[in-house]
Image: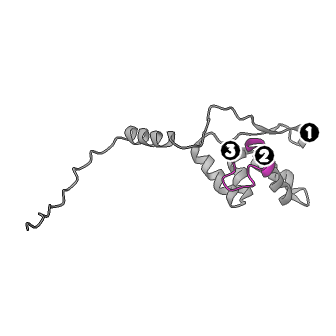
Amino acid sequence: MATPRKSTARKAAPRAKESSFETFSRFRARAANLSFTFDNSEVIEPFVLGPDDGFAPPVVVQFPDDLENQYVLDRCLRNNDFFGALEVLMRGDLRRVLQAFSAAEDGHRLLAGLVYSIMDHFLGRGGADVPGGSQPS
């Protein structure tokens, strides 16, 4: 009886280095098969603290439009870091809000309520109450 011949393991051919465009195309193709949808063309109206709220000129809060600040905001919300979340959202107007809230005895509570009100405005009511809060969740 003849013994089967053992074959030697073949080495894989070296893979050509992908350009970043090809890599990103591969990521896009992979994401196309996922069940979530993300529409970044939707305009998110700003959250405004105006004269009726004690802010003249108004404090206009925009949802971050860049991925890096969206990530930082998500991390802040997951860690209940209200100062960090407001820093991302308000940028230069944060000091005005902190000064106004410092005058109140329950300033920390006001700060937390403000963060949740802003996130309710951007993500829908309760969107920030769950991990990964967003409209689809």
Q: Nearer the viewer, mark 3 or mark 1?
A: 3
Q: Residue at x 89, y 56 (%)?
A: 103
Report the Cα–Cα distance between label 3 and label 1.
Answer: 32 Å
Q: The residue under label 3 is which amino acid type? A: Pro
Q: Residues within 10 Å of mark 3 (few under 14, many from 20)?
A: few
Q: Say if the magenta span includes residue 125.
A: yes
Residue at x-position 86% and y-position 41%: 55
The percent position of residue 123, horizontal first and vertical second, equals 73, 44
Residue 41 rendering spot, x and y as whole percentages = 62, 31
The stretch of residues the image draws in magenta is 116-137
Binning the other alpha carbons within 10 Å of mark 1 as few (below 14), some (14 to 19) or many (20 upward) gives few
Q: What is the C-alpha distance between the residues marked 3 and 2?
A: 13 Å
Is 94 placed left or right of 103 in the picture? left
Residue 37 drawn above or below residue 106 = above
Give the image location of residue 39, x and y in percent. 62, 35
* Residue at the image position 14 percent from the left and 64 percent from the top: 6
> Which of the 4 image quadrants contains residue 131?
bottom right
Position of the N terminus, as image quadrant, is bottom left
Q: Which residue matches tag 2?
A: 120
| Residue position marked by numbered label 1 in the rendering | 52
Residue 92, image quadrant: top right
Label 1 sits on a secondary structure element that is helix
Instruction: Between label 1 and label 2, give the one nearer the viewer.
Output: 2
User: Does label 1 or label 2 sit earlier along the sequence?
Assistant: 1
Disc 3 marks which residue? 136
Helix, strand or loop status at disc 3:
loop
